[in-house]
Amino acid sequence: MKQNELNSPAGAKHKRKRVGRGDSSGQGSYSGRGCKGQKSRSGGGVRSGFEGGQLSLIKRLPSKRGFTNIFRVKCNVVNVGDLGVFSPGSEVTPQALLQARLIKSASLPVKILGSGDIHHPLTVRVNKISATAEGKIIAAGGKVQKIL
């Protein structure tokens, strides 16, 4: 095969559309621009992102103010230091935390955070726990079990 024998595949090349060359050409009168309006004028048209004068999306977005994560899961938060109200060797569950009034409702998952200290062993059964809190509970001789 030689370079002068190469051809484009069928349908790959199109004739240039010559607009505004009479009505019989199929692209006469308005030249495919329709009637009147901003997009029909010469030099007309709008920049990308323009929304017809409505406040544009980029301006509607909160600037340098963070955002609200719609996938955030709210949790009942309890610190390790608050678990001192339980007797040594007892089991800490969402129901036990509710009875001790450390959380407001048992419908939300419970997360234990590492603020404070614990000095006696407990068996903690909660949904989530921070690494610091887990380390403190295990160091005190307790056990940690995650529930779903």
Image (cartoon, helix red, strand yellow):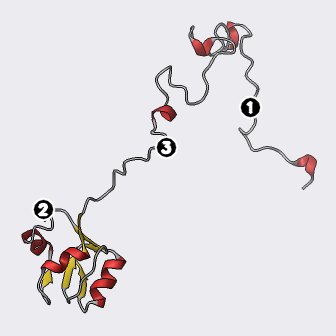
Quarter assignment of residue 46? top right
Q: How far apart are marks 1 and 3 (CA)?
A: 49 Å
Q: Which of marks 1 and 2 is in front?
A: 2
Nearer-N-terminus badge (1/3): 1
Q: Is residue 58 left or right of residue 1?
A: left
Nearer-N-terminus badge (1/2): 1
Q: Camera-side residue: 111 or 79? A: 79
Given contact means CB atoms under 8 Å apart, are the residues at marks 1 and 2 in contact? no
The numbered mark at residue 14 is: 1
Question: Whole-percent x and y of residue 52?
Answer: 50, 20
The numbered mark at residue 105 is: 2
Amino acid tagged 3:
Lys
Q: Is residue 66 left or right of residue 85?
A: right
Asked if 34 appears above or below 136 in the picture, the reply is: above
Quarter assignment of residue 127? bottom left
Which quadrant would the N terminus be assigned to in this image?
bottom right
Q: Residue at x 19, y 79 (%)?
A: 125
Q: Which residue is drawn at 62% across and 19% down?
A: 45
Q: Is residue 63 left or right of residue 122?
A: right
Given contact means CB atoms under 8 Å apart, are the residues at marks 1 and 3 in contact? no
Amino acid tagged 1:
His
Circle 3: is it few (<14), some (14-19), or many (20+) Cα within 10 Å? few
Question: Whole-percent x and y of residue 138?
Answer: 29, 88
Judging from the image, what secondary structure is the residue with disc 1 in? loop
Which quadrant would the C terminus be assigned to in this image?
bottom left
Q: Camera-side residue: 84 or 125? A: 84
Q: Distance between the residues labelled 2 and 3?
A: 34 Å
Q: Residue at x 47, y 25 (%)?
A: 55
Amino acid tagged 2:
Ser
Judging from the image, what secondary structure is the residue with disc 3 in? loop
Q: Nearer the viewer, mark 1 or mark 3?
A: 3
Residue at the spot of label 3: 64
